[in-house]
């Protein structure tokens, strides 16, 4: 299903915008000459999809040079489409999204996302061991949904470890446009570490995660 989904998306992009580049998880990407790049995750949350134990989504982001300009995260089972335009705000099924200040750390619901390889699971275990006693609770969710759920106020903050660009590109733009504060070990988030939080939660959550991740 990953491969079939990606082929549908990449073929459609190629037919409409043949000069654009595509970066896609399952290897169907190609170079381009226009300066625009589509970043595609055809199925984020594959294990959830296979086991039917949690949410999954289809994620597409459009970059111009090195900046995300548009993004969509579609969750088919829930019938929800999160979208954003750079500088134009974020939407859920066409309705605007905007985060509030957020709770204190001890009341926060925090999403956690990580790649399921041994090294990253060990790293995630260390972070969760230190973080869980300090927050209200933790949920493990796929990286893109972690970010858009923050945009929708369902999670107060979150972190993602050792992702790929296609895992976080679309969700990060939606979160940013909704007012979620994003960062990593520095002021910019990265595939190695992405932290997101509502504005008032950001100082405490980012400090704690940076100290252990």
Image: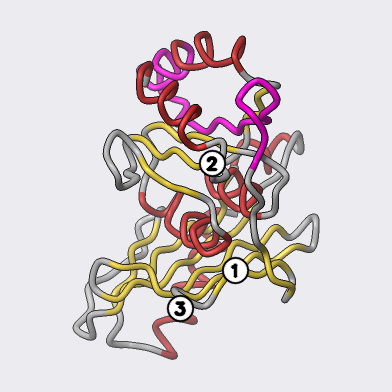
Dot 2 alpha-carbon crowd within 10 angstroms: few under 14, some 14 to 19, many 20 or more: many
Q: Position of residue 145 (x, y in %)?
A: 61, 48
Determine which residue is flagged by label 1.
Answer: 90
Q: Earlier in the sequence, mark 1 or mark 2?
A: 1
Q: Position of residue 70 (x, y in %)?
A: 46, 74
Give the color scheme: rainbow, by chain, secondary structure or one colour: secondary structure
Q: What kind of element bears circle 1? A: strand
x 59%, y 14%: residue: 134
Q: What kind of element bears circle 2? A: strand
Determine which residue is flagged by label 3.
Answer: 11
Q: What kind of element bears circle 3? A: helix
Q: CA distance from mark 1 to mark 2?
A: 16 Å
Q: Quadrant of the C terminus?
A: top left
x 70%, y 48%: residue: 153
Q: Are marks 2 and 3 in contact (CB under 8 Å)?
A: no
The stretch of residues the image draws in magenta is: 102-125
Q: Is residue 68 left or right of residue 3?
A: left
Q: Earlier in the sequence, mark 2 or mark 3?
A: 3
Dot 3 alpha-carbon crowd within 10 angstroms: few under 14, some 14 to 19, many 20 or more: few
Q: Are marks 1 and 2 in contact (CB under 8 Å)?
A: no
Membership of 115 in magenta stretch? yes
Q: CA distance from mark 2 to mark 3?
A: 36 Å
Determine which residue is flagged by label 2.
Answer: 197
Q: Quadrant of the N terminus?
A: bottom right
């Amino acid at each position: 299903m990953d491969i079939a989904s990606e082929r549908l998306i990449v073929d459609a992009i190629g037919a409409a915008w043949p000069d654009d580049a595509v970066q896609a998880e399952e290897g169907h990407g190609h170079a381009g000459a226009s300066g625009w790049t589509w970043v595609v995750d055809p199925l984020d949350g594959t294990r959830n999809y296979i086991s039917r134990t949690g949410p999954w989504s289809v994620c597409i982001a459009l970059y111009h040079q090195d900046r995300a300009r548009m993004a969509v995260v579609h969750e088919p089972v829930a019938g929800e489409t999160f979208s954003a335009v750079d500088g134009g705000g974020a939407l859920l099924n066409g309705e605007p999204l905007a985060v509030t200040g957020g709770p204190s750390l001890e009341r926060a619901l925090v999403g956690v996302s990580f790649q399921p390889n041994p090294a990253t699971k060990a790293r995630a275990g260390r972070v969760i061991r230190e973080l869980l006693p300090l927050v209200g609770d933790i949920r493990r969710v796929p990286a893109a949904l972690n970010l858009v759920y923050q945009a929708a106020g369902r999670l107060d903050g979150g972190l993602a470890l050792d992702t790929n660009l296609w895992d976080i590109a679309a969700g990060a733009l939606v979160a940013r446009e909704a007012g979620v504060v994003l960062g990593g070990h520095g002021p910019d988030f990265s595939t190695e570490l992405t932290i997101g939080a509502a504005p008032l939660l950001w100082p405490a959550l980012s400090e704690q995660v940076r100290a252990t991740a």
